[in-house]
Image: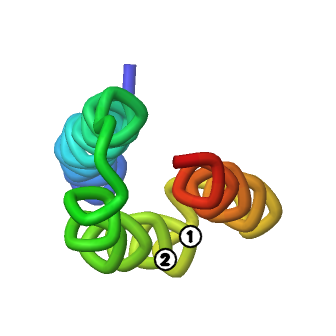
Amino acid sequence: MANHKTALKNIRSDEAKRTRNRLQHKTMRNNLRDFQEIKTKKAADKALPSLISQIDKLAKRNIIHANKAANLKSKVTKHIASL
């Protein structure tokens, strides 16, 4: 168990950050899944900017790795090209 007030506070804040990061990561995965189900190019082009923005924000905050973000964006653009 922690012996200092700051250590206890760090434990509390780390848990809050962890839950927030997990929620944002899960939301992005759900949005990716929904994007992959889009069948029309017009709808995919409309949804693309918000998905790319979300991926970039997660990479900027180190919730996902920068290379993973690049791979996801590449996968999404390939999906649009295949429509």
Q: Where residue 51 sits in the image (x, y, percent)?
A: 33, 64
Residue shown at the point (27%, 50%) measured from the top left: 17
What kind of residue is marked 1? Ala
Foreground pick, 37 / 69? 37
Foreground pick, 28 / 38? 38
Quick check: 8 above or below 47? above
Quick check: 63 above or below 25? below
Q: Which residue is mark 2?
A: 56
Instruction: Say whether residue 72 is left or right of residue 60.
Output: right
What kind of residue is marked 2? Asp
Foreground pick, 6 / 46? 46
Residue shown at the point (22%, 52%) measured from the top left: 13
Question: Image quadrant for the N terminus?
Answer: top left
What is the C-alpha distance between the residues marked 2 and 1?
5 Å
One can see residue 59 in this view = yes
Mark in the foreground, 2 or 1: 2
Residue shown at the point (32%, 36%) measured from the top left: 39
Spot the residue most to the top. 1
Q: Are the two marked residues, 2 and 1, in contact with CB atoms closer than 8 angstroms?
A: yes
Q: Where residue 4 sits in the image (x, y, percent)?
A: 32, 48
Foreground pick, 28 / 35? 35
Res. 49 image quadrant: bottom left
Q: Which residue is mark 1?
A: 59
Q: How many C-alpha atoms fall within 10 Å of the one at disc 2: few (<14), some, or many (≥20)?
A: some
| Label number found at residue 42 | none
Spot the residue most to the right. 67
Quick check: 79 above or below 34? below
Q: Where residue 83 sits in the image (x, y, percent)?
A: 52, 48
Residue shown at the point (36%, 79%) measured from the top left: 53
